[in-house]
């Protein structure tokens, strides 16, 4: 399976870039700090519990984006000078990427001096603390996620994210068109982009240039949204199953167990994705077979195995 990794472990995001992109949607105001400096945001291991992306003000387990709301600012305003000085030193020496002030509030003037001294930006927002944290976590998770571009067609089939792969010329796009006609949805053709957004979750999307388009041999490039409507397109989906089309010469061997599903795992961005090999041959209805494979996959995930059920029936009939 051809893959192109487009992110690496050194990925980072400057605070000014976050501010510029989300200024309008998060109603951000740059209160203090050099716009061209700061440590920025970096992707950390999902298993790391030392520091989070965004969260409430925390000195023990600091976040890259420290959020201070009305409760926290009230505490700072009521603290005596010695306690306030100690709190400010701990807050600004933690080297977070930025401090965000929520609820449309402004921090005490003492924050400005510390912001300039430790080169730590302070950004204000009219959003509530909870909403600001949720929005920042989602944005940073997407922006900093490790990503790969895989060759194939990414579909939503029976509410399952399915990547259809295989050698060029086997009919992946024709199969995708058949599935769209049967009520399933296209996410991306040719070069879907996948990002690991959680320890066991890979999210698939379509590059902006390719959105809505499907290339079919003999027909050229088709706009699926214009032809079949908005319901035929899905913007993103978690990758749960890979179906690999294989040519007739690579058909299953005689020694393969015909009772059990031939399923293996494919590692995508550190996550093992169930993979089914589906032989291509004249007269085979691949769309029906893909639907059956997805339904069987769902049954297996729920603990039911048709082959084990059949074998158990055989044993009982022989007793």
Image (spheres, rainbow, N blue to C red):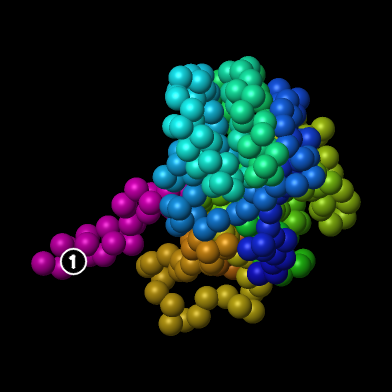
Please give the range of residues in magenta. Answer: 293-319
In the image, residue 14 lies in the stretch drawn in magenta: no
Is 116 situated left or right of 160 in this image? right
Residue 230 in sight: no
Q: Which residue is mark 1?
A: 315
Q: Position of residue 42 (x, y in %)?
A: 63, 53
Residue found farthest to the left: 319
Judge by depth and name the residue closer to the eye, 305 or 128. 128
Mark 1, Cα crowd under 10 Å, few <14 / some 14-19 / many 20+, is: few
Residue 257 in sight: yes
**In the figure, residue 248 lies in which quadrant?**
bottom right
Disc count in the image?
A: 1
Q: Position of residue 264 (x, y in %)?
A: 47, 68
**In the figure, residue 16 lies in which quadrant?**
top right
Relative vertical location of residue 233 with respect to residue 299 in this rendering, above or below: above
The residue under the point 46% across, 32% down is: 82
Q: Position of residue 218 (x, y in %)?
A: 87, 55
Relative vertical location of residue 303 with respect to residue 271 in this rendering, above or below: above
Is 244 situated left or right of 272 in this image? right
Q: Position of residue 141 (x, y in %)?
A: 59, 45
Judge by depth and name the residue closer to the eye, 111 or 145. 111
Is 55 situated left or right of 186 in this image? left
Relative vertical location of residue 313 with respect to residue 201 in this rendering, above or below: below
Residue found farthest to the front: 82
The residue under the point 63% across, 37% down is: 114
The residue under the point 61% across, 18% down is: 105
Callout 1: SS: helix
The residue under the point 61% across, 28% down is: 110
Q: Main secondary structure of the magenta part?
A: helix
């Amino acid at each position: 399976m051809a893959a192109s990794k487009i992110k690496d472990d050194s990925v980072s995001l400057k605070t000014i870039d976050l501010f510029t992109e989300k200024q309008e949607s998060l109603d951000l105001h740059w209160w203090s700090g050099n716009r061209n400096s700061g440590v920025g945001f970096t992707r950390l291991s999902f298993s790391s519990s030392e520091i989070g992306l965004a969260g409430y003000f925390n000195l023990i387990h600091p976040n890259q984006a420290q959020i201070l709301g009305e409760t926290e600012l009230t505490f700072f305003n009521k603290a005596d000078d010695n306690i306030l000085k100690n709190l400010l030193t701990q807050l600004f020496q933690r080297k977070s990427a930025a401090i965000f002030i929520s609820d449309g509030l402004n921090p005490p003037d003492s924050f400005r001096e510390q912001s300039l001294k430790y080169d730590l930006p302070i950004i204000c927002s009219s959003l509530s603390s909870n909403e600001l944290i949720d929005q920042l976590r989602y944005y940073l998770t997407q922006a900093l996620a490790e990503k790969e571009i895989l060759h194939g067609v990414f579909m939503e089939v029976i509410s399952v994210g399915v990547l259809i792969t295989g050698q060029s010329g086997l009919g992946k796009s024709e199969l995708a068109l058949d599935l769209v006609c049967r009520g399933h949805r296209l996410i991306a053709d040719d070069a879907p982009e996948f990002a690991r957004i959680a320890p066991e979750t890979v999210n698939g999307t379509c590059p902006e240039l390719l959105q809505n388009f499907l290339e079919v041999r003999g027909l050229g490039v088709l706009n699926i949204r214009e032809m079949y409507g908005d319901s035929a397109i899905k913007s993103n989906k978690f990758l749960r199953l890979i179906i690999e089309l294989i040519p007739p010469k690579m058909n299953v061997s005689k020694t393969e167990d015909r009772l059990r599903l031939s399923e293996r795992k494919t590692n995508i961005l550190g996550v093992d994705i169930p993979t089914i090999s589906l032989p291509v041959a004249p007269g085979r209805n691949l769309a029906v077979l893909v639907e059956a494979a997805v339904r069987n996959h769902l049954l297996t995930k729920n603990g039911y195995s048709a082959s084990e059920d059949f074998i158990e029936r055989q044993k009982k009939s022989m007793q």
